[in-house]
Image (tube, rainbow, N blue to C red):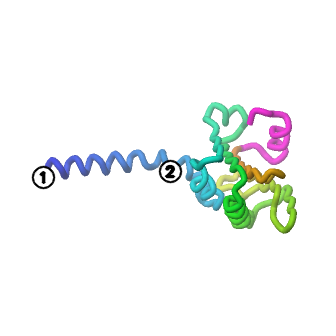
Amino acid sequence: MKQIKYVFVLLLITAFSLQPDSLSAAGMQKDLKIQDVFVRYGKKKNVTMVELSNEMLETYGMTRYKSITIKQDNEALAFVRSCLEADQKGARKIKEVTDDGGVVSAYYQLPGKDEDINRFVLFKVNKKGVVTLVYIEGDLDSDDLITLLFTKKDL
């Protein structure tokens, strides 16, 4: 019985020691509703999710890059739009395009938790109904990001 308690305590210690690392990846955007999009749809069929490694992030002056592309799913589109609506409160709208009452393209700069870190959300629905959502944070500013997006084709 004593040995079972000992093993149980070891398992708890191991679980809690691993938890901060796994939470820190999501922790940077946990205050945003769009995090729910990545969690809900990230591993579903017809979905592509990309998260850049630290080496790639440093190359582009970013601390986090996460994108998701969802193919022709009206329920997902509605969910993404509702999450964007919640997150854009307090955000600087750099660009927003609507069609038939719904956002089809958006580029927001969100308030950062740290003064030196900027956060951006990019969103687009193409004519075929493919939804793309991108979350970026780093020390780059809006102009840097625009330059990066229009000159780098490998992101």
| Tag shown at residue 1 | 1
Q: Residue at x 84, y 68 (%)?
A: 101
Q: For mark 2, what is the residue?
A: 23
* Other residues around mark 1 within 10 Å, as few (<14) / some (14–19) / many (≥20): few
Secondary-structure class at tag 1: loop
Q: Residue furthest left?
A: 1
* Residue 105 in picture, x, y percent from top left: 82, 55
Q: Residue at x 66, y 53 (%)?
A: 114
Question: Is 153 included in the stretch rendered in magenta?
Answer: yes
Question: Is 93 included in the stretch rendered in magenta?
Answer: no
Mark 1 vs mark 2, foreground winner is: 1
- Taking depth in this image into account, of 133 and 70 the one nearest to the observer is 70
- Please give the count of numbered marks on the rendered protein: 2
Location of residue 87 by image quarter: bottom right
Vertical order, 27 against 50 (above or below): below
Q: CA distance from mark 1 to mark 2?
A: 33 Å
* Other residues around mark 2 within 10 Å, as few (<14) / some (14–19) / many (≥20): few
Mark yes or no: residue 117 visible: no
Position of the C terminus, as image quadrant, is top right
Residue 80 falls left or right of residue 145 = left
At label 1, which amino acid type do we have?
Met
* Residue 68 in picture, x, y percent from top left: 67, 47
Mark yes or no: residue 9 visible: yes
Q: Residue at x 63, y 31 (%)?
A: 55
Task: Tell me which segment is drawn in magenta.
Answer: 139-155
Secondary-structure class at tag 2: helix
Q: Residue at x 13, y 51 (%)?
A: 2
* Residue 84 in picture, x, y percent from top left: 72, 62
